[in-house]
Amino acid sequence: MRDIYKKAVLINSLDGDFHAAVLGQALSKRGSRVIRWNAEDYPTRSSVSIRYAEGHADVRISTGEHHFSEHDIGVVWNRRRRVPEVPKVIDVRDRQFVQMELDAAFHAHKSLFSKAFWINKGISADACELKIHQLLMAQTVGLLIPRTLISNRPEEIRAFIEGAGEHIYKPLTGYVWQEQGSVTQTFTAKVTAELLPENSLLAATPGIFQTKIPKKYEARIQFFGRFYGGVRIESHTLSCGDLDWRIGQGSIKACAPAVLPDEIYHKCLDLMERLDIVSGGFDFIIDENDQWIFLEVNEAGQFMFIETWCQSVPLTEAFCQFIERADPQFEYEPVSRPLTLKEAYEDAKRSGLETELVFP
C-alpha cells in the first residue's frame, strides 16, 4: 500500500469528462492531491520538459494550474487520451512535420511516471484496444468467444456470412460521424449476404464478423484490481437489444447486480494479467445454456452508469479505495458508510459541474 497523500493523483483526461470531474472531486475531498491534465491543453496551454544530466532525467510538466515533476506523482489515472492537435499558428507547409513531432512526443509521454501506479499503463492500454489481440488472449485464458472472422478478403467474408446461423458486424474501432448537425456512431449491426457491399468496399478495410449469439441476458462487469462490480442487463427487453444494448440503454431504469461464476472470475483476472491492465470493463453475453461468452474488455470504459442502474454496487467507493491503495491486487474493504455516486455527483455539482445525471 502506498501513501498517496504525500504524492498526487494525475488524471489524464479530456475537457468535459464526467468521470474525471466527479471522481477527481471525490478524491480531493477524501484527502488526495489531484492534478488534472487535459489532452486538449498540449501543446498550446501546457508544456513538458525533460532534462537529461548526470545519468538521470528530470521531467517537468506545466499546465494552466499546476507545475509538477515526475517525482510528485504517485498514481496516474489514464482516463482519456488523444493525440495532440497542431496549433493553428503553424504554417500549412509545416503542419505535417509538427503533427509527426507531436505524435512522437505523445507516445513518449506514456513512458513517464515510471514509478507511479498506472490505471492503466499507456503501452498496455494501446495493446488492449486492439480487438485482434484481445480476442486471442481471451481464448488463451479459456474464455469462450463467438465464432469470429476478422478479414478484408471478400470471398472469406461471404463464405462466413453464408454459413449456418445469423451474423453480426462490428468495427475494429468505434467512430462518430458529425454531419449537418446530426450525429451517427458505430454499433453492432446485423449482416446478411444481401447486405454486404461490393467486393471493392469489403476489401477496403477489415471488419469483425461474428455468429450472432441468442441472448438470455448480458452482463457488464467492472474490475478494479481483484474486485469487481457489475450489472445484469436484460437486453431482450430493449430496442435492438438483440444486437447492441447500448442503442436502447436510455430506457434502462434499474438492473440487478451480476455475479460472476468463480471460473469466469479467475479467467478475467488471467486475461487482465496477460493484457497488463489493472482495471477494465468486461462485456459478456450469457446464452440460453448459461454459458458466459466474452465480447470485449474496455480498459478505460465508462463505469458510473453501473451504479446509477444498481446503487447497491459500490463502484464509487471501490474506485476511490483503489486509487488510494494503488495496489494491482486491490480487494475492496466494505465500510459502514461508503461514498456513493449520488453523493459524489451532488458534491461535484456544488463545485460547478454542469452535466446532469439522472438516478432512478
Image (cartoon, rainbow, N blue to C red):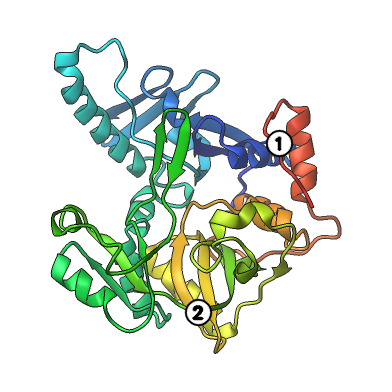
Q: Quadrant of residue 151?
A: bottom left
- Residue at point 27%, 60% (across, down): 207
Q: Secondary structure at mark 1?
A: loop
Q: Which residue in the structure is indicated by mark 2? A: 214
Label 1: few (<14), some (14–19) or many (≥20) C-alpha neighbours in 10 Å: few
Placement of 147 over or under 37, stated as above or below: below
Q: CA distance from mark 2 to mark 1?
A: 35 Å
Which amino acid type is shown beneath numbered disc 2? Pro
Placement of 198 over or under 357, stated as above or below: below
Going from the N terminus, do you reach mark 2 or mark 1 first?
Answer: 2
Label 2: few (<14), some (14–19) or many (≥20) C-alpha neighbours in 10 Å: some
Q: Secondary structure at mark 2?
A: loop
Q: Quadrant of residue 229?
A: bottom right
111, 296: nearer the viewer: 296
Q: Which residue in the structure is indicated by mark 1? A: 356
Q: Is residue 198 left or right of residue 246?
A: left
| Residue 321 seen from this side | no
Placement of 71 over or under 93, stated as above or below: below
- Measured as percent of width and height from the top left, residue 247 is found at 54, 55
Instruction: Name the image quarter holding the N terminus.
Output: bottom right
Which amino acid type is shown beneath numbered disc 1? Glu
- Measured as percent of width and height from the top left, residue 143 is found at 43, 80
